[in-house]
Image (cartoon, rainbow, N blue to C red):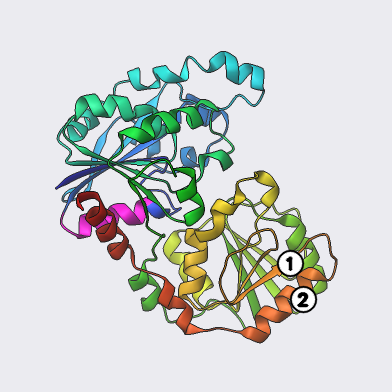
Amino acid sequence: MKITLLSNHYYRSLRRAGFHFLADALHAAGHEVTFITTGLSWISYARRDYRCSYPGIREAHGRLCEERPGFFSYVHFTMWHPHTLILPLLDSMSSRFVYRYDRFSMGEAENKIASSDIIIYESCNALFLVEKCLKLAPKAKNIYRVSDDIRVLRSAHPELQIVEKKVSETFNLISVPCSYLAKKFSESCNVRLHPHGVNTMLFDAVDNSPYAEGVNAVFVGNAYLDYEFIEKASGACPEIMFHLIGSFQKDLKRDNVVYHGEMAFEDTVPYVKFADIGLYCLDLSCSSHSRSFTDSLKLKQYRYCGLPVVAPSGLDLCREGVFYYDTFRSDSCKTALADALQCGRDPTRADEVSGWDAVATDILSDLYR
């Protein structure tokens, strides 16, 4: 089959998200795949969007690129794209313009969309393109893969929530990674739970630790890091090395806090696999809907490696081997880390995690069931 995915991510990005792995799994299963990047415009350069820094992305604007036989990528670059203007009044004034986003031509990608058997939309500005795609490919089956709760996205225009509710009725399948998000679409009868997967072959192949001797705790990601936890925990536990992988400001300077910066996904794997603790220290003040983080890709990777996890008390992960802290209590961070170390690894935690090939199979099975 021919499958098109519309995502917020750039396929050649160093950051690998669920949509990257899902696309790769679908291609590995024998399908022709087209991966389209949406929500990229001159506004992205003005606000220093991380995607704009990748080599070759300017040349990729509006070009259909064959990454490998049967796998194509396309960057839908426009003059502007729907984006919050921060102030409610400005967002209100711009609300009517965001619905014109689908008027921009998608060039060669439109032919790929028109010939698609299945179109998969990520929870991002791709939702503004649903009606356009329905006209291009009226016979295609449509899947909404809710990789993130749009209510916690900081850059999303408020109209995106309205559009999501409107177009959700048009999808043949709504695929969610956690039960909290399933409740959001409780009125729909075509919601199915498909937790994120892990690139199991890549993790299994790594056998060399990047760490020196000692105790190592790792955080991998690019958003919602709880800096207050890192400050308190690193001060209370000088014997633990805290490794932060992602594009974070180096505001806290301590000998036991190591900033690795952003790195290619495959380079992060050994840091996760050979860590002693997986840090899920998220800043939950970002949204009242932070419970949508209960089944993230990061957490799945920690679990696959059998790591004990340290998380904020406001986030009930409903798993054993998770130890909670309260940043309002000075001793809480230290206690959570000590309990995690005492608990240690447990390889059976990997049993709850599927590979992305199984996730892709389940999604397509439920689509045609």
* Marks 1 and 2 in Cβ contact (< 8 Å): yes
161 vs 3, nearest the viewer: 161
Residue at 28% over, 63% down: 357
Q: Going by the image, does 44 lie left or right of 223?
A: left
Q: Is residue 293 above or below residue 159?
A: below
265 vs 323, nearest the viewer: 323
Dot 2 falls on a residue whose secondary structure is helix
Task: Say which mark, if any, is on residue 335.
Answer: 2
Residue at 47% over, 68% down: 301
Disc 1 and disc 2: Cα gap in Å?
8 Å
Which residues lie in the magenta part? 19-30
Residue at 24% over, 53% down: 364
Q: Earlier in the sequence, mark 1 or mark 2?
A: 1
The quarter of the displayed image where residue 75 is located:
top left
Q: Is residue 273 magenta?
A: no
- Magenta: predominant secondary structure element? helix
Locate residue 297, reporting x and y percent.
47, 60
Locate residue 334, reporting x and y percent.
78, 74
142 vs 23, nearest the viewer: 142
Residue at 56% over, 39% down: 151
Locate residue 197, reporting x and y percent.
39, 63
